[in-house]
Image (cartoon, rainbow, N blue to C red):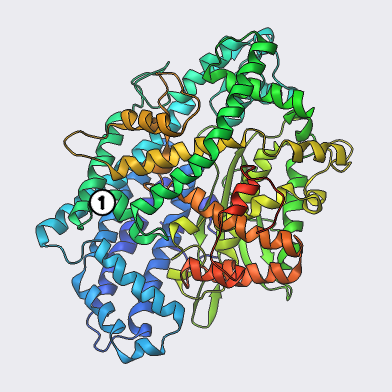
């Protein structure tokens, strides 16, 4: 049987990939890689071409076999695929740890770093080699054999636990629905949300309307449903997913999973000589010490909390006067916030959505990129995809050369992981004189189109799309020819959000909005009056939003910094402490937010969620140069492209930022962009 995962490809053959292909392909590649590495280590006099380049070939082949599998498991999850995926996780983890602990391989790298050739390597090659030596140490290369074996066990178990965490959240999200045959309890829901609920019911052979915990449906109910009891019921179902509380209490419960993840991360950090996992996490980041991170977060909280307190008091007063609500509950926040926004700014999210049909936004996004960097984007026809809604595109430079390709999967559906993300499919590299064109997966979970209308995006969803596309551009536009520093690879994790958060700024600019907006029926551009209202409301509840993000960041960091094996995770005890310090609104006791916090328990943000705020400083400050020189100024766009997007991980992120901005970053632009400081000056 031919195995599509073993074939060389420019774009994955999705139509032919089956769960039964996965494990045999990975087994074969790992076996062949091990044999080839043993052969490489018999070579005397190591050079870039006889050590690093062949290792890059092996990494690339494995990456290209695993990337479509990892992606399919996230976007069209099924039991056979899940089993195949999970069967490979310990094998991949064992292989990665084995390489990281291979003393001969480490000494080969060190010999190259200490040789005369090192001085002849370019800056990117030297950084790759230095990063590799650091990563050997972080994989336990110099540990005694017994500790190496324990480290390997920990890595394999963590891979399994993190996958289990995400599966539990996905299963819990899919397990809850609420069916209605009467429209009365759904009063207040906009027609767009009702149409999606009708489609969800019809898909299951039901009449009426079906509510789910997919985020677009949940957000619509929490924002617009007049039925307070329905809001409370749905809120409880959502915030107790995969926990010991709520309507599915005990099913898919992540409690034991979270405790074991924290315990193993702490043990891993101590094996490597760090006091805790937070210190280990910072070994590959811009921030240098836990004290520096905590100081940064607490200073932001001190600036934002007074504003957040004012905003909450205003919301409570509004709810009393306009809703007769004497005590605001968690399931009232989004509902009365929307009412207050409408009252103060005469601005409704539903009105705004009419001007952001998804096809127009996507085409406009491409137009913005063309004006910024001179690239064009065109759709690819006849490309194999995993769902009929998915589209594939390529980016071409001014000379018509293809710089990158990407898939766009915009809409929520069952068996698809929630949230939005960019993931690598193929990374850029140069081999045998040819450039391997990078490919990205861009995934969102927006409200899908209906039979009668295109998908209409909230402005927040437009921001999300621009954010993920910023990540995509970072991956696709790189000009680095080496795998380990191409695109986002080799970029410090707390700088990796810079290009994504930078792109969000264009969603507020009149010149850019002219491209991305147009009424879904008439095509009329976004009226100036409506834009003025949006800009006036831009900082609406910015303080509350800021302290909520700081709550997540502080909780994550302290959870990993203060872990004590004798006491366990103390997860909700710590979360309560953080809320006492920075939050202005306390959720109910049954809230189990952490049980579905996939960023830190399933993804790569453990002791690193602060990166969103850290990089937001960089992004706001970078964009302030465009504010000074013109948001579509070609020279500024060219400078951002050259110094940030194209350089990837070939040099430290701070050097790239200084090359673009001419100085170190300042926090002022972020405080202006979030309304914490008045927007009266440029920096």
At 68% from the left edge and 12% from the top edge, which residue is drawn? 321
At 34% from the left edge and 74% from the top edge, which residue is drawn? 130
- Between residue 407 and residue 625, name the one nearer to us: 625
Q: Quarter of the image for the N terminus: give it.
A: bottom left
- Number of numbered markers: 1
Expressed as whole percent of the image width and height from the top left, the position of residue 601 reads 37, 41
Q: Quadrant of residue 190?
A: top right
Expressed as whole percent of the image width and height from the top left, the position of residue 559 reads 32, 40
Q: Which residue is mark 1?
A: 155
- Residue 338's place in the image compared with 325, above or below, is below
Q: Quarter of the image for the C terminus: give it.
A: bottom right
At 25% from the left edge and 61% from the top edge, which residue is drawn? 139
Expressed as whole percent of the image width and height from the top left, the position of residue 24 reads 34, 55
Q: Quadrant of residue 309?
A: top right
Q: Secondary structure at mark 1?
A: helix
Question: Taking 423 as reference, is 100 left or right?
Answer: left
Residue density around tag 1, few if under 14, some if 14–19, many if 20 or more, within 10 Å: many
- Between residue 305 and residue 493, name the one nearer to us: 305
Residue 85 visible: yes
Residue 3 visible: no
- Residue 667's place in the image compared with 40, above or below, is above
- Between residue 603 and residue 77, name the one nearer to us: 603
Question: Taking 11 as reference, is 250 left or right?
Answer: left
- Between residue 155 and residue 384, name the one nearer to us: 155
Expressed as whole percent of the image width and height from the top left, the position of residue 177 reads 53, 19
């Amino acid at each position: 049987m031919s195995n599509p995962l073993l074939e060389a490809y420019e774009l994955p053959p999705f139509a032919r990939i089956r769960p039964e292909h996965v494990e045999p392909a990975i087994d074969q590649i790992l076996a062949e890689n091990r044999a080839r590495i043993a052969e490489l280590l018999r070579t005397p006099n190591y050079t870039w071409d006889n050590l690093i380049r062949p290792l890059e070939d092996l990494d690339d082949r494995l990456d290209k076999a695993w990337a479509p599998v990892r992606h399919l498991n996230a976007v069209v999850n099924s039991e056979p695929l899940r089993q195949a995926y999970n069967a490979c996780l310990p094998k991949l983890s064992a292989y990665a740890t084995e390489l990281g602990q291979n003393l001969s391989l480490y000494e080969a790298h060190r010999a190259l770093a200490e040789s005369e050739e090192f001085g002849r390597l370019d800056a990117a090659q030297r950084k790759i080699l230095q990063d590799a030596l650091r990563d050997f140490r972080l994989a336990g290369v110099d540990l005694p054999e017994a500790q190496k074996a324990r480290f390997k066990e920990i890595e394999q178990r963590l891979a399994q636990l993190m996958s289990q965490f995400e599966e539990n959240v996905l299963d819990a999200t899919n397990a809850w629905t609420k069916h209605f045959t009467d429209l009365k309890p759904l009063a207040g829901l906009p027609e767009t949300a009702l149409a999606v609920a009708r489609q969800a019911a019809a898909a299951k052979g039901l009449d009426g309307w079906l509510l789910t915990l997919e985020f677009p449906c949940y957000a619509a109910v929490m924002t617009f449903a007049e039925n307070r009891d329905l809001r409370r019921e749905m809120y409880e179902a959502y915030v107790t997913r995969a926990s010991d509380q709520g309507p599915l209490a005990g099913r898919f419960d992540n409690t034991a999973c979270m405790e074991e993840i924290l315990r193993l991360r702490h043990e891993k950090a101590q094996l490597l000589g760090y006091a805790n996992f937070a210190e280990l996490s910072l070994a590959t980041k811009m921030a240098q010490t836990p004290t520096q991170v905590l100081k940064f977060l607490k200073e932001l909280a001190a600036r934002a909390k007074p504003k957040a307190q004012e905003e909450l008091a205003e919301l409570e007063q509004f709810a009393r006067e306009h809703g007769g609500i004497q005590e605001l509950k968690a399931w009232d926040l989004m509902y009365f916030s929307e009412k207050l926004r409408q009252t103060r700014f005469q601005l409704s999210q539903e009105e705004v959505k009419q001007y952001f049909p998804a096809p127009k936004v996507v085409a406009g996004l491409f137009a913005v990129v063309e004006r910024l960097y001179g690239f064009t984007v065109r759709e690819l026809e006849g490309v194999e995809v995993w769902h009929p809604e998915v589209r594939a595109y390529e980016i071409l430079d001014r000379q018509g050369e293809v710089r990158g390709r990407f898939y766009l999967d915009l809409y929520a559906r069952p068996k698809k992981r929630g949230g939005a993300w960019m993931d690598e499919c193929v990374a850029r590299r140069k081999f045998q004189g040819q450039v391997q064109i990078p490919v990205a997966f861009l995934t969102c979970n927006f409200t899908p189109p209906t039979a009668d209308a295109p998908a209409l995006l909230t402005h927040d969803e437009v921001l999300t799309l621009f954010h993920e596309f910023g990540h995509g551009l970072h991956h696709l536009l790189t000009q680095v020819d080496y795998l380990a520093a191409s695109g986002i690879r080799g970029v410090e994790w707390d700088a990796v959000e810079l290009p994504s958060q930078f792109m969000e700024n264009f969603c507020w600019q009149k010149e850019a909005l002219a491209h991305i907006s147009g009424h879904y029926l008439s095509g009329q551009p976004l009226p100036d009056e409506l834009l003025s209202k949006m800009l006036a409301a831009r900082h609406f509840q910015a303080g509350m939003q800021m302290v909520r993000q700081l709550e997540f960041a502080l909780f994550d960091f302290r959870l990993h910094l203060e872990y004590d094996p004798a006491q366990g995770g103390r997860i909700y005890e710590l979360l309560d402490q953080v809320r006492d310090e920075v939050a202005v609104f306390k959720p109910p006791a049954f809230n189990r937010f952490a049980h579905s916090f996939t960023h830190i328990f399933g993804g790569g943000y453990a002791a690193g969620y602060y990166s969103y705020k850290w990089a937001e400083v960089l992004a706001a400050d970078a964009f302030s140069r465009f504010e000074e020189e013109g948001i579509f100024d070609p020279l500024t766009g060219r400078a951002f492209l050259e110094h940030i997007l194209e350089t990837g991980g070939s040099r430290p992120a701070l050097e790239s930022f200084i090359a673009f901005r001419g100085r170190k970053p300042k926090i002022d632009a972020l405080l202006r962009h979030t309304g914490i400081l008045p927007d009266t000056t440029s920096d």
